[in-house]
Structures are given as C-alpha cells and as structure tokens.
Image (spheres, rainbow, N blue to C red):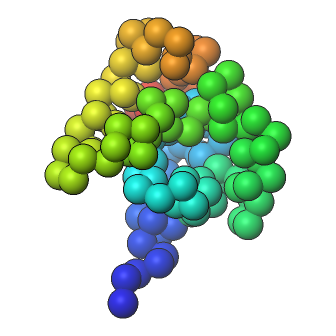
Amino acid sequence: MPDLTVTRRTSSKAFAQSGITPEQLDVVEVHEAFSVEELQYIDDLGLAPEGKASVAMADGDFHIGGRAAASPSGGLIGRGHPGGATGMPQFVEIVQQLRGQSGERRQPNPGSASHTRSGPAA
C-alpha cells in the first residue's frame, strides 16, 4: 500500500528545518501526473486549509500572480509527463522563477518573503 501521509510528514519536517512556513512560499512545482494530484499536494503541503485546496484554486490563490503559483510551468501533465525525466524540469522552473527568467510564467517577486524567513530563501 502506498503511504498517503508521506508528503504531509516530510514537508512538515522540511518546513521545521528551514524555518519557513507554507504561507511564505511564493511558487511551487508539485508532482501532478494526474490533475487531482495537484490539489492533493497543495493540501498536503499545507498551502490551503485541509480539504480546501479546490476552493483556494478556484479563487485564484495558486495561479500566476496569486498567493503561491502552483506548477506555473504547466507541470508534468503540461510536458506530457515523460517518464524518468519529469523531476529535473521542475527544479529548472523554480531556478528560472527565482532568477526572473520564466517569461510569461513568472510569479511576481518570487522569494520576496525571504526577509521574514529565519532560514535560506526558498
């Protein structure tokens, strides 16, 4: 059986170690091989109140320009989900976001909340 709590548990530890909170994230790339997974990961990462990811998505919270752009690259589905090659473009997207090289996909001021973080900018 797959462990359905792994994302919630590991992200909670990562937030604790980094000294940041989900509310401080500006942009995220999530592993959404199926459209419903984006909502599940948003929920598991604590980016929306539990069970309210779809409402927050409909309100624009996770669109480019929203509170925290979710998979602005189009995600795995947008790339055709090429098996084995899906994770690296997500890292590249976040680097391009932080460098201001994402063009029309750029989330405004990613990393701007870093002055409120006790750890390194994400």
Question: Which sits in the foreground, 15 or 33?
Answer: 33
Residue placed farthest to the bottom in the image? 1
Q: In the image, 69: left or right of 57? A: left
> In the image, residue 97 lies at what x, y percent?
44, 20
Residue at 23% across / 38% down in the picture?
A: 88
- Count of numbered labels shown in the rendering: 0
Q: Nearer the viewer, residue 65 or 113?
A: 65
In the foreground, 5 or 19: 5
- Residue 7: x %, y % from top left: 45, 65
Viewer-closest of 102 and 5? 102
Q: Would residue 3 be visible to someone looking at this image? A: yes
Residue 20 versus residue 67 in the image, above or below: below
Q: Residue furthest front?
A: 80
- Residue 10 percent coordinates (x, y): 41, 64
Q: Is residue 75 left or right of residue 113?
A: left
User: Quadrant location of the N terminus?
Assistant: bottom left
Q: Which image quarter: residue 113?
A: top right
Q: In this picture, is 91 found above or below 12?
A: above
In which image quadrant can residue 61 be found?
A: top right
> Which residue is drawn at the image coordinates 57% and 61% (left, top)?
36
Q: Write the residue at 71% across / 29% down.
A: 66
For residue 67, what is the image quadrant?
top right
Q: Residue at x 32, y 48 (%)?
A: 81
User: Which quarter of the rendering shows the C terminus?
Assistant: top left
Say left or right for 117 vs 75.
Answer: right
Task: Say above or below: 60 vs 101.
Answer: below
| 18 lies left or right of 89 | right
Residue 28 image offset from top left, x and y in percent: 49, 38
- Whether residue 17 is visible, yes or no, is no
